[in-house]
Every structure is written in structure tokens, then in C-alpha cells.
């Protein structure tokens, strides 16, 4: 309400003004109650939609997992018969195959690794200070084959199966 509207209030007796103001207040309370009901209904429906979405998504994910598990031995057979040594196969609706796991550099004997690095490579920043500790990022960066350092090994990662369908899912 503008200041002009406040100053232009009709002149009436205070009892009538109180009565009209009370009517406005009842209407405001009624509208706020209606809004609260709509907000509550909205939140309830959103909760139901979220639960439905979770349930349907889990159902699809479960079926996708099952299909991939059943498909994996077939793709392994196709890859094994591939003369080029490729780890994937092109299928009608996409590509499926196996990805090599990521290698992981592991410090098995930090004492031996620190001794070797300190003696054989003085001045190379592979040792953290103040408490001597092998700095794996530096070892990986400076040594293409870190397993040649005593006390350090490279663990092969697990091979993973993947599917890459062609095109976007239709709606």
C-alpha cells in the first residue's frame, strides 16, 4: 500500500474501521492458511515423486546390471577371437569391451625405498621433509618404471567391462 493510500483513508467511525480491518485480517489469515496447505501438498507430492523416481531408477539400474553381467562373457568370447588383440567389439547398437585397470604405485617398504633414493639419487625431490617420507607423485613423475626402486611396487588395476550405446536414449 502506498503512502498516498494510507493518507487517503476514508473517514469513518473507529468501530466501523475496526470491523473492516478485522475482515481484511481474516482474509489474510485465510489466504496464508491456503498457501500453507498448498505448500504442504506440494512437499508431499514432491516426496512421492522422489520416491517413485528412486524406485524406477533402481529398477532400471538393476536391469542394466543384469544385462551387462549376462553380456560380459559373450563380449569376452568375441574379444578373445579378435585377431588384432582389440579389447572391444563394435555391435549394432554400440561398443562393448574391457578397459585395463589403472596401475597403482605402492610403497611396501618405505625404509628400503628411502635408503635407495637417498643413496642412488641424491638431490632428487622424491623424499618429503622434515620427517623423511617417499613422495609418490614425484616418484611417478621422475621414474617411468617406479618398481625398479627397492621397496616400491606397481599393482595392476582390475580390468573393467564397459558398454557404450550409440545415440541418445529416445523419450
Image (tube, rainbow, N blue to C red):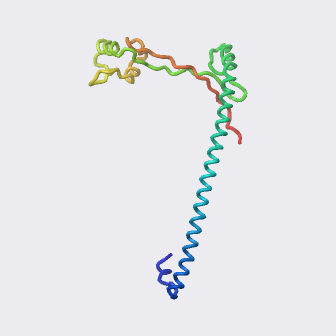
Q: Position of residue 136 (x, y in %)?
A: 38, 22
The relative height of residue 24 versus residue 35 in the rendered view (above or below) is below
Locate residue 120 relative to residue 47 in the image: left or right: left
Please, is residue 135 above or below residue 25 in the view?
A: above
Q: Relative to residue 125, is residue 36 depicted above or below?
A: below
State which quadrant residue 70 falls in.
top right
Residue 62 is drawn in which quadrant? Answer: top right
Foreground residue among 125 and 56? 56
Q: Where in the figure is residue 71, as x and y percent of width and height?
A: 69, 23
Foreground residue, 27 or 46?
27
Residue 148 location in percent, x, y? 40, 11
The number of numbered badges drawn on the structure is: 0
Q: Can you say which quadrant of the picture contains the C terminus?
A: top right
Residue 114 is situated, as x and y percent measured from the top left of the image, at: 32, 16
Closest to the observer: 37 or 54?
Answer: 37
Q: Residue at x 35, y 16 (%)?
A: 110
- Residue 134 found in image quarter: top left
- Name which residue lies at 54% across and 73% down: 25
Viewer-nearest residue: 2 or 32: 32
Residue drawn at 63 percent across, 40 percent down? 54
In this picture, residue 107 sits left or right of residue 64: left
Q: Which residue is at 46% across, 78% downward? A: 3
Name, please, the residue furthest toward the right.
92
- Classify residue 101 as left or right of residue 123: right
- Residue most extreme to the left: 130
Amino acid at each position: 500500500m502506498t503512502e498516498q493510500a494510507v493518507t487517503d483513508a476514508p473517514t469513518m467511525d473507529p468501530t466501523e474501521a475496526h470491523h473492516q480491518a478485522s475482515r481484511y485480517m481474516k482474509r489474510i489469515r485465510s489466504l496464508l492458511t491456503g498457501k500453507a496447505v498448498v505448500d504442504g501438498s506440494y512437499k508431499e507430492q514432491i516426496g512421492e515423486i522422489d520416491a517413485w523416481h528412486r524406485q524406477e531408477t533402481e529398477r532400471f539400474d538393476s536391469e542394466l546390471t543384469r544385462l551387462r553381467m549376462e553380456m560380459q562373457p559373450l563380449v569376452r568370447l568375441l574379444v578373445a577371437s579378435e585377431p588384432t588383440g582389440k579389447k572391444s567389439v563394435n555391435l549394432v547398437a554400440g561398443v562393448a569391451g574391457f578397459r585395463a585397470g589403472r596401475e597403482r604405485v605402492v610403497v611396501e617398504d618405505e625404509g628400503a625405498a628411502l635408503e635407495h633414493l637417498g643413496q642412488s639419487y641424491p638431490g632428487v625431490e622424491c623424499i618429503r621433509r622434515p620427517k623423511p617420507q617417499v613422495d609418490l607423485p614425484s616418484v611417478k613423475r621422475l621414474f617411468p618404471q617406479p618398481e625398479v626402486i627397492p621397496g616400491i611396487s606397481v599393482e595392476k588395476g582390475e580390468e573393467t567391462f564397459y558398454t557404450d550405446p550409440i545415440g541418445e536414449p529416445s523419450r
